[in-house]
Image: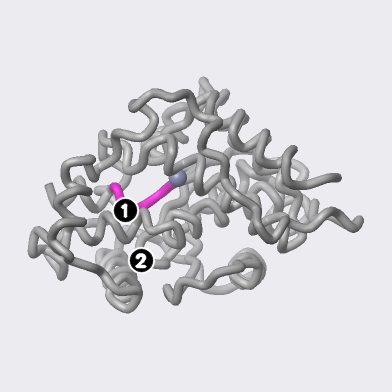
């Protein structure tokens, strides 16, 4: 159970292409022309999803559990959430199972990307963020308590700064929009908040339960796109990447863990497309 919950906390991404990399994080495709800024009152229109409970149910925290959490008054502060992320990272590091890259052009460029995206937030949660680069060909990325983990495999797959920024922005969104907090609150209610979770990274990749539902995904797709747009990336490249992932049939084994933790649907794609068309002008 603990393992399952853990998995839910993380999110993943994917990629696999080997050519055309002109910059350390892929093609430099930041926007060079002035584009319409993200409207101050930008809203994610969740009405783009069909009116069917299947889009709002699912994920590791059930509706009944959400209700129980609300009734209990149990809360997880941003401090606790950040501490939890620190613990998870320390645990992954000490396990010796992850090859963290902590220097070099890709590592440095990732730090800059995180900083730029965080600066683009209109509302700041207080969660502490860190981004990590893992040497692993699997197309994946995930997050827990403000820590965002990016595999080298997804950088190659995205092969584009803007597409990668969409993924990082999406992961930030799962934190800023309270999805991770809800999971941690569930853990806290179970009195298993500190320690004893096993290998978080492995748990994340093996879970069979999607962490988030389609409404969660649509919400953070739009959130990530807004961050990208405000930071000067091309949000349309992110849209293309999600599509590419969903169509990578022959590579399913490489991207499976990502799609499992970030359930994808055609509706999700259409929602993001509408969001971009409605709010930005190129
Ligand atoms: Zn997601």
Q: Is the image coloured rainbow, by chain, by secondary structure, or in one colour?
A: one colour
Mark positioned earlier in the residue sequence (1 or 2): 1
**Ligand 1 found in image quarter:** top left
Looking at this view, is 53 or 21 the one in front? 53
The CB of the residue at mark 2 lies under 8 Å from ligand 1: no
Residue 156, relative to residue 97: is it above or below? above
User: Can residue 185 be seen?
Assistant: yes
Which disc number belongs to residue 60?
Answer: none
Which quadrant would the C terminus be assigned to in this image?
top right
Q: Secondary structure at mark 2?
A: loop
CB contact under 8 Å: marks 1 and 2: yes
Residue at image coords 57%, 52%: 223
Prevailing secondary structure class for the magenta stretch in the rendered image:
loop
Identify the residue under disc 1: 9
Is 116 included in the stretch rendered in magenta?
no
Distance in Å between CA atoms under marks 1 and 2: 8 Å
């Amino acid at each position: 159970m603990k393992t399952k919950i853990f998995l839910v906390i993380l999110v993943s991404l994917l990629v696999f292409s080997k050519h055309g990399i002109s910059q350390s994080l892929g093609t430099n495709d930041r926007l060079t022309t002035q584009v319409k800024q993200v409207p101050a009152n930008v809203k994610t229109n969740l009405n783009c999803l069909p009116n069917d409970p299947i889009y709002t149910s699912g994920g590791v925290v059930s509706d009944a559990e959400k209700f129980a959490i609300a009734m209990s008054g149990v809360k997880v502060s941003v401090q606790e959430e950040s501490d939890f992320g620190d613990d998870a990272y320390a645990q992954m590091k000490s396990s010796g199972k992850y090859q963290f890259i902590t220097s070099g052009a890709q590592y440095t460029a990732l730090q800059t990307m995180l900083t730029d995206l965080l600066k683009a937030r209109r509302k700041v949660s207080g969660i502490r963020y860190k981004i990590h680069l893992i040497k692993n060909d699997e197309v994946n990325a995930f997050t827990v308590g403000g820590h965002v983990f990016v595999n080298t495999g997804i950088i190659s797959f995205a092969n584009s700064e803007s597409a990668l920024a969409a993924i990082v922005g999406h992961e930030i969104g799962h934190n800023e929009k309270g999805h991770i907090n809800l999971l941690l609150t569930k853990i806290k209610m179970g009195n298993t908040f500190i320690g004893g979770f096993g290998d978080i990274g492995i748990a994340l990749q093996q879970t069979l339960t999607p962490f988030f539902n389609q409404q969660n995904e649509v919400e953070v797709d739009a959130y990530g796109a807004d961050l990208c747009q405000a930071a000067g990336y091309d949000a349309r490249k992110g849209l293309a990447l999600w599509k590419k992932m969903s169509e990578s049939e022959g590579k399913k084994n490489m991207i499976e863990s990502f799609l499992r933790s970030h359930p994808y649907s055609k509706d999700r794609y259409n929602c993001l497309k509408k969001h971009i068309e409605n709010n930005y002008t190129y």
